[in-house]
Image: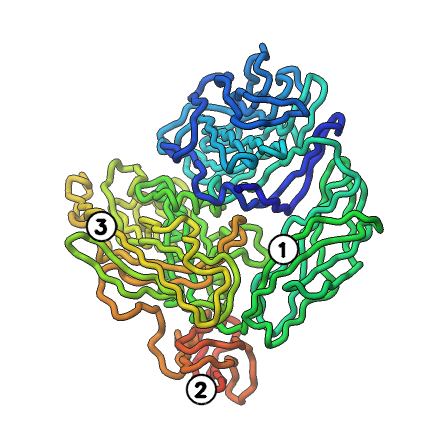
Amino acid sequence: MKKLLLSLFAISSMMVANAQYYYVVNHGGNPKGLNTDFEYSTGNTSWPAGWNKIYSTVGAAPAWSATQNIGFAFMFNGTPVTSFKVSSSGVLTFDATTTLAAPSVAHTNLPSALIPKKSICAWGLQTVARTSFFAQYQTNDIVTKTFGTAGNRQLWIQFNQYGEPNLQLGWTYWSIVLEEGTNKIYIVDQETQGVNSSGSSITAKTSLTVGIQTDSVTAYQVTGSPNVANLAGASALTGDNYFYEFNTGTQPTINMRILGSQTPKTTPNTGTVSIAVNAANLGTAAISTATFNYSINGGPTVTSTNITPISGSVPNVNVVTETHATAFVPALSDVGVLKTVAVWFTAINGGAATSDTLTLNFVINKGITGNKHVLIEEGSGAWCGYCVDGHIILRDILAQNPNVVGVVHHNADGMVNANSDIINSLYATGYPYGTVDKYLFSGQTTVGLNRGQWASMAASRLNAPTPVNVSIANKTFNATTRTVDFDVKADFVDYYYGDLRVNVYIVEDYVRGPLVSATSTTWNQHNYYSKYFSTPQGGTTHELYNQPEYFYGYRHNHVVRNILTTPFGESGVISPLSALNDSKTKHYSYTLPAIVNVSDADFPGYTNIDSSIYQSTKAGPAQNKHYDSKIVAFISIYNPDPTKVEILNVIEVPLSFATGVADVKTSAVIGAKIYPNPTSGITQVDFNLTSTSNVTVEVIDLVGKKIMDVKQGAFANGTHSVYFDATDLNNGVYFVNIKSSEGSATQKFVVSK
């Protein structure tokens, strides 16, 4: 049965009028449920199987659709309903006899004389004619699909709108969901994306009236109506970033619900495990006291009466994180043993009321780390004149850090692919942006980072522990069929628990395309740093200052040409609990499209330009070149909340060149090696182990005084790299001292600025 599991982070809701019939729970965050199935529409040119288009218009005034059957028994406001119709302005009504015209996009508070009785509103959506800029997207359609099995079905009515009042270009998805059995109604804000006329992302949000109108005088609307903001940047595929749950009936006095775990799923045996959950007060009375209980693997119940009070609401729902006063203290025998924890609350406000029970899992591991590599994913577009500066920054990071892999997801140009579009829609904060291991760093509100942060964040992630090494094995390339076969291997050096997934990108360097026109940005790269641009960016010392405003035959590097898995990896390859020394292998096969050549005719007036750094308008191979293509494979932790996805390790290998048993990106060192040397900033230390060992890496000065702790922890056998920042060290001679159970090594390095 597919259901929306309730995941609640920020809560802010209200109802107007009388609370007799409906009360509202506003769910922020990304609920795990239907949208994680990747059978969900995103507005592309054709709908996936099972979706039924019931309304389509471009630029027309709002109108009602034909009457649609629900397909299962459903009660609205205590009365059976069997059918509905919808307007392109975001209103669904069960009142088949209404004589009211479909409401315009000029929305107001509920109740409104413009809205029929028995209606559900995401009122204010607007239809406009699409332009060629996003011609690949289906526009202004309303589609339906029923999920689940009889008795537990959900009917999704999805509004796909192109162009909004506050967006010059863009799209938004909202859905109204009817749930069989519970008679609950969900109004779901799925995605808003937009760009302005120059192609830059827009953060402006349209506003809507969100709620239910039962008759001409009774309505229940969400706080902020009629100005409920669309939330920008979430993905219709991978999770809803906000949804509103309308419950029928009178709001209870005491009702405590556990909405999710805050307990880490994997913890080293050197620490304790805090048992923590999100708990919500769905009742009208404040919850001041309760007994917090947990039991591990069916063992004795551990209790605590120390809880954080949760204020009541009429009908607002409030939520807090409750942390049990007694943490779990692991013993050595707990390492690698899956812990199943039951959590519940009793004696709420001293009475007999109890909460529901949540079951969560975690595992204790040894804290051993493998050979860590980091993935930077840049979002870019040929139309984006700032993005060429991002290309330079990524180029320099990769040149300085051999254990960093870089890829580029393109937007709205000739190198777009559908899966990269999804990734950009989730993480773009403007172009160019970048993610580093898709990790949400402390102090950051978004996973997407500006280009000035990429280097430092990558350096910090290089020292992050990883329980898994990734490699490519058994790779073969058939030059006749242009098919590459290979295995992705995940070798675990420690225990780990979570939804781990295999991800595979096909990446190509030196991608070029025809000029099309002098100002086209299908393949030409715009350059705002050029002295020929109307307002040159970066000053006269920028390396792009003396370059053209439009690069013809621009060499686009690290372009993600295809993603062989879903945008967030393939599940089922790795079991939820990975054991020490587990090895998982997944075979992939990919056939490259035919090589695309460019000729002199593709660059009229600009033939035979050749810059080894930036561009080439010489005739020859331009796309799908096997010798310029690479395989990028990585293991990630999946979460329906995209801010909680994390890449554990990554590998990059050539697609077509012959390899041995396995391609592993390592530094060929024995003992210890420092790079660069002399150094002035981020510095890499390589060392090799023949068995798992506890290692300490530190920097000392000429008299043997320790001046910096670099890394301390358990490392698996093999080659490792750790990093430190020499920026604050004075010029002079220093030493890196590496100590392990296998012995020690000392290497000299020089700081020169």
Q: Specify the amino acid type for callout 3.
A: Ser
Bin the neighbour count of mark 3 within 10 Å (Cα to Cα): few under 14, some 14-19, many 20 and up. Answer: many
**Seen from this angle, which residue lies furthest front?**
150
Q: Is residue 607 left or right of residue 65?
A: left
Q: What's the CA distance linking mark 3 and mark 1?
A: 59 Å
Q: Closer to us: mark 3 or mark 1?
A: 1
Question: Residue placed at 22% from the left, 63% from the top?
Answer: 657
Q: Quadrant of residue 679?
A: bottom left
Q: Specify the amino acid type for callout 1.
A: Thr
Q: What's the CA distance linking mark 3 and mark 2?
A: 48 Å
Q: Are marks 3 and 1 in contact (CB under 8 Å)?
A: no
The earlier-in-sequence mark between 3 and 1 is 1
Q: Which residue is mark 2?
A: 745
Q: Quadrant of residue 77?
A: top right
Q: Which residue is mark 1?
A: 359
Helix, strand or loop for disc 2: strand
Q: Nearer the viewer, residue 565 or 743?
A: 565
Q: Which residue is mark 3?
A: 616
Asked if 321 appears above or below 42 in the picture, the reply is below
Q: Position of residue 1 (x, y in %)?
A: 53, 42
